[in-house]
Amino acid sequence: MTPQQDMAPAAGTPTPPATGRNPTAQRRNGMPAFFDDAPTLTMRDPLAAFLGAAEDGVIEYTYADAVRLAGHSCPTVAGAYLMTLRGLRALYGDALPERGNVEVSMRDQADSGTTGVIAAVVQLLTGAARETGFHGIGPGGRFSRQDLLSFDQPVSGTFALRRRDTGQAVQVELDASVVPWPDEMRSLLPRVVVGSPTPEEERRFGELWQQRVQRMLLEHADDPEMVAVSEWTEAG
């Protein structure tokens, strides 16, 4: 994904202060060390509890999980992760969000821009899926996650989240321009993408790329200027 794509509206839990880690510093599994400092999301999944997959169905999700799903770390993935965390916090407060109990309404069509990437991250965290999702157990489809994710919906934000039990709904939006690309990235990008970059230029490109992600996750996760959450009154 290009910096231009990530500047477009894409967008947890309280985030710890920035640690000053170099984004190129690697932890044992080869991922950037700052991933460990990003906010996490703890959910209760009734299906996981029912099938004995997790004690009491409690599962913790990390930014690294979103990166593994997407196959890369970028402002779009970070934005989708943070928007989901912030939206769930608005819906559940201090209570554990319930995975599989949230409907997701995406504003744009599935094949529009980065919508598919955002939706994949949201699905990972909420369990909400399209027609290919889990059909449920038994005649009544208990624990079904099918048809909880929809596209091209009347949402002003990037997407909306609605609790199935209470009907409460919020929409979320990201202004990635709050954390802009440095001037060095703008001059380096053409050489890396269409030129013949040196190994040092490629290394620097990756470093600058992750620096922006790091700032989003560690310095601006709770910044209302970057991640906006508002009530969604058109749900239903």
Image (tube, rainbow, N blue to C red):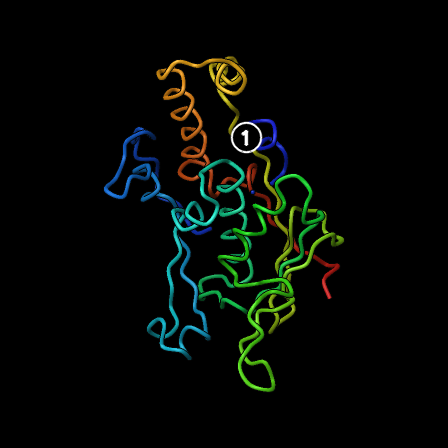
Q: Quadrant of residue 200?
A: top left
Q: Position of residue 130 (x, y in %)?
A: 63, 62
58 horizontally vs 171: left or right: left
Q: Which residue is mark 1?
A: 178
Residue 135, percent from left and from top? 58, 74
Q: Residue at x 46, y 75 (%)?
A: 47
Amino acid, disc 1: Val
Where is residue 148? Give x, y as percent.
63, 65
Q: Is residue 133 above or below residue 2?
A: below
Residue 101 horizontal side relative to residue 26, left or right: right
Q: Residue at x 61, y 59 (%)?
A: 161
Q: Closer to the camera, 71 or 221?
A: 71
Q: Quadrant of residue 225?
A: top right
State the residue in front, 122 or 175: 122
Q: Is residue 228 above or below residue 75?
A: below
Return the residue nearer the eye: 101 or 94.
Answer: 101
Q: Give me the residue at 50% from left, 46% from top.
A: 82
Q: Is residue 55 above or below residue 180?
A: below
Q: Quadrant of residue 226?
A: top right
Point out the image quarter for the N terminus: top right
Q: Secondary structure at mark 1?
A: helix
